[in-house]
Image (cartoon, coloured by chain):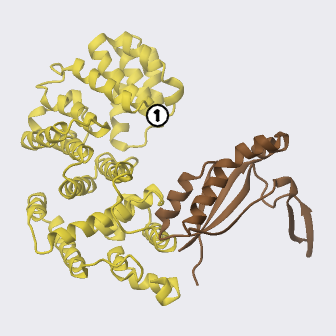
Amino acid sequence: MKYMLLFVGTRESQDQWDTMTPEQLHAAMGGAETWFEKYTQAGKITGGLQLQGYKTVTTAQDSNGKRIVTDGPFIESKEVIGGFAIVDVKDLEEAQEMAKSWPGGPVEVWPAVER
Amino acid sequence: MVRVLGNFDIAEEVVQDSLVAALEKWPAQGIPDNPGAWLMTTARRRAIDALRRDRRYAEKVALLERSTLPGETREADDRLRLIFTCCHPALAPEAQVALTLRAVAGFTTEEIAAAFLVSEPTMAQRIVRAKRKIVAANIPYRVPAAAELPARLDAVLAVLYLMFNEGYLSRGSAAASRRDLAEDAVWLGALMVRLMPDQPEALGLLALMRLHLARAAARFDGAGEMVLLADQDRSLWDHEAIADALRTLNRAAAMSSPGPYQLQAAIAAVHSEAASWEATDWRQIVGLYDLLLDLNDTPVIRLNRAVAVAHLNGPQVALGEVNDLAIALSGYHLFWATRAELLDDIGETALAREAWQRALELCANPAERALLRRKLSG
């Protein structure tokens, strides 16, 4: 069954990335890269992306009957999405195991609609 | 099931009767290997339902519990898997309790709604949502692996303890004590012990619940007023049940792996063994609370320890410890009641009165409120 693992971060943590040197960034992201490699090789990850910071986001939405594009994420919150992985595993517990072993912040586990 | 029928409403209608039925029919990995055992489980649940109304229900359930039927092992495995699925941490705690009562203890939705003082549609919706999540998120139907077991067993025991407390001292209900729910929690606790005999905390919880239930007859006087442990007629306690619970606790203790339920049971055991409130071994109780705090340092445990300290070291020392909890527990009626009692003990009657008043304002349970009113007027 497929799940989306949503990697949640904060605006503050993303702001810190901007001040890091490439070496520091690499060190900070190393754990995540190892995690992706491990589960991709095991055939559990079928897709996913690391996303650029929230400052790069735009949102298309309806406003007064018109479709407009605005700067920033639609959801105004302290939390932001740092990336996601599409995983194909046996059941919820296997997906939770992967989420628990993620070396970063909180991970939301979203079951996908099966067709 | 959803995948087969393509529509959850139809699927839900089919499985409405019980989660057991849903588990039976799931097309994926959820199919039990032995469907016959399920039918037997259901039949036995019906028998237990009928027995519940019987006067000698407890004895008969105990008999039923001990009986071995053909396919018993397989049935036990299925039942255990069912309990762990119902108490899965991916479900909200109140949904865990409701599902366990529905699918494992065989309650009707109406009975569960009555027990938790919500309307039947609300409870039905809570159960349906939980079942839907089990199917939609593919929560597995199995006993967790050894590495996961301690945490998952804790979740199951927490559900049973919540159920027990809801029955033993139902907050805000007109009937102060709902014995049925408490007895069902004990029954499920006994079932867990039978299915997992090597888990000391499961034994500890069973002993704890049985020790509390053994005092039930002394908890209310002839007029239906609540009687505190200090004032209870100890001859009304069920001493046979106490001895039985102590044997269970000893079995747990022999495994040399203390935990919060075993320690709480040990504290209840010290009270049960005392001939009177005055003869209570307070030193041992304070020591047990210290061990409990090592495992789980919470303001409520500190408050309970302070009560024992009052008897061991005097009310002045205890009052100091209680006052330290003022910020954490200012919304808890028993904090104010404890403080009031200690203030009365040292002769600060005006301050004590204020504290009794606060306790009364914060308390929702009718029996406890009546007790607090008596304290205020006396």
Looking at the rendered structure, the number of numbered marks drawn on it comes to: 1
Q: Nearer the viewer, residue B343 or B263?
A: B263
Label 1 environment density (alpha carbons within 10 Å; few <14, some 14–19, many ≥20) = some
Instruction: Give the residue displayed 34% in from the left and 76% down from the top.
Output: B18
Q: Is residue B378 visible?
A: no
User: Which residue appears at 57% of the width and 80% of the height?
Assistant: A114
Q: Which chain is yellow?
A: B
In the figure, the shade used to draw chain A is brown
Position in image of residue B169 (x %, y %) = 32, 45
- Point 79% across, 54% down: residue: A76
The residue singled out by tag 1 in the image is B332
The answer to whether residue B56 is seen in the rendering is yes
Q: Furthest-bottom residue in view?
A: B5
B186 and B145: which one is in front? Answer: B145
Q: Quadrant of the C terminus of chain A?
A: bottom right
Label 1: which secondary element:
loop
Residue B306, above or below B163: above
Estimate the x, y position of residue B335 in percent, counting from the top left. 43, 28
The picture places residue B270, in percent across and down from the top left corner, at 18, 28
The answer to which image quadrant residue B191 occupies is bottom left
